[in-house]
Amino acid sequence: MAAPFARLAGNAPKRLCLRPSTFSRNTISRCRSISTTLPRRQAEPTSYQATRLIPTDPTFTSFANKEGHSEDEFAADMESTDTGANRKIRHYTVNFGPQHPAAHGVLRLILELNGEEIVRADPHVGLLHRGTEKLIEYKTYMQALPYFDRLDYVSMMTNEQCFSLAVEKLLNVEIPERAKWIRTLFGEITRILNHLMSVLSHAMDVGALTPFLWGFEEREKLMEFYERVSGARLHAAYVRPGGVSQDIPIGLLDDIYQWATQFGDRIDETEELLTDNRIWKARTQGVGVVSAAEALNMSFTGVMLRGSGVPWDIRKSQPYDAYDQVEFDVPVGVNGDCYDRYLCRMEEFRQSLRIIHQCLNKMPAGPVRVEDYKISPPPRAAMKENMEALIHHFLLFTKGYSVPPGETYSAIEAPKGEMGVFLVSDGSERPYRCKIRAPGFAHLGGFDQVSRGHLLADAVAIIGTMDLVFGEVDR
């Protein structure tokens, strides 16, 4: 019997050419082309029969194969054996991003698909690489601080906080209590800023636009708090080694309190739209499931780890600044899917509000940075009256300050996970080495394992729940 069509298609070296069947050749007299266009000398065709294309091997001299079957017998055999069980489908490779609207920046994924099922995912990073770690080696410790704003540009002050804690460890300085509480206050405001962007852009990626518009109204209010305290809406450079750059303006704490009292209602409104929505549940429940063991093996931190049932939070286990003086709970997921991670982030909104209220009630008076003018600049009034203060200010912002030789690792619970800085000092005014541990890099590295077996549409939901920002991933 003739080889079926699927067997011919499986022979890689051979190319199939298509020619009309015998019946269609008889209807049109001596047309060498398989096109249905008629020669000009022929007035009209005898009949308009559809041309049926049959695969043939160009190496055959005639259609009859070695077993002696004719063309009609081969066609009948092809129709009888052309079933789904005999077909072989090659995996399809597509580029997801970097122009895709759900790529969250410059993410490029090479997806290998079996139909719509993801067989393999290969993330390509580096499109936003700027050599941040190398640039820091050529800057003073004060000049290196703004680079951290540019890493995770959705949660800026927590990045500054991580670097400042590392420098303070090497300097062996203790910052004032008021500076600790201000850092804690704006650390939680930054966490809400980040989760608003994360949850609502995730919802928008899977088709829910309304919460995104509501949430950005709240983000604008928080950006105003950033601007009033530091002068900038995004790259604040507010948290610095030795404390913070300046004290909170008069009236800002009252405005933060008024905002915090009404933000709980905005959380409830968002949950009314999403939490029990059957479409949202269908797109997130059972999608991107990560067990606790897998999350630990892939170095997941933050919500990606707590959503799988591991109650790990650096603010509890290794508290820094004023986190040992506030009360809050750590939300933990059960199933480890996108829906549980969404619920964890929604609960972290409420826990951050608890911490903000405690910071407002317990905010002490006093200075906001250390009194050592070799580390923090003197007040502006002193610069106009005292020559020594002016010299300190000039040296601090030109030459910088020397840090004793040593190395340290400082980690904080950033909104996306564990943000770490490994800092090495050789005793000069510039870091010898500054290694940045970004949580999103580990999360993106586990995308292949998390997305395998899901559909192409689920890749969008998984990317959204990982909360990726490529300023910190590519660095």
Image (spheres, grey):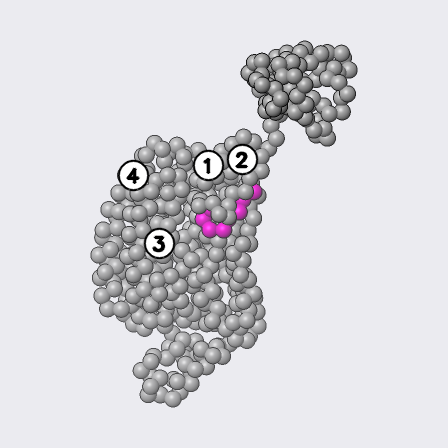
Q: Is residue 134 above or below residue 78?
A: below
Q: Residue at x 37, y 67 (%)?
A: 238
Which residue has dot 1 on it? 458
Whether the residues at callouts 4 and 1 have beta carbons within 8 Å, the answer is no
Residue under numbered circle 4: 273
User: Mark 4: few, some, or many residues within 10 Å (few <14, many ≥20)?
Assistant: few
Mark with earlier residue (2, 1): 2
Which region shows up in magenta? 103-112
Q: Are marks 2 and 1 in contact (CB under 8 Å)?
A: yes
Neighbourhood count class around disc 3 (C-alpha, 10 Å): few under 14, some 14–19, many 20 upward: many
Q: CA distance from mark 2 to mark 3?
A: 32 Å
Q: In 3D space, how far apart are the residues under numbered discs 3 and 1 (Cα atoms)?
A: 25 Å
* Mark found first going from the N terminus, 2 or 4: 2
Q: Position of residue 60 (x, y in %)?
A: 76, 21
How far is mark 2 from mark 1, CA to CA?
9 Å
Q: Residues within 10 Å of mark 1 (few under 14, many from 20)?
A: many
Query: In the rendered structure, are the residues bearing label 3 and label 4 in contact, judged by CB atoms less than 8 Å apart?
Result: no
- N-term mark: 2 or 3: 2
- Is 205 placed above or below 164 here? above
Instruction: Give the image location of residue 27, x and y in percent.
Output: 62, 14
The quadrant of the picture occupied by the N terminus is: top right
Calculate the distance from the C-alpha at mark 2 to the C-alpha at mark 4: 30 Å
User: Which residue is depicted at the point 42% across and 55% down?
Assistant: 414
The three-letter amino acid code for the residue at tag 1 is: Asp
Residue designated by label 3: 193
Under mark 4, the amino acid is Leu
Residue 65: quadrant of the picture: top right
Residue 110 versus residue 19 in the image, above or below: below
Residue at 29%, 47% (x, y): give it: 214
Q: Secondary structure at mark 3?
A: helix
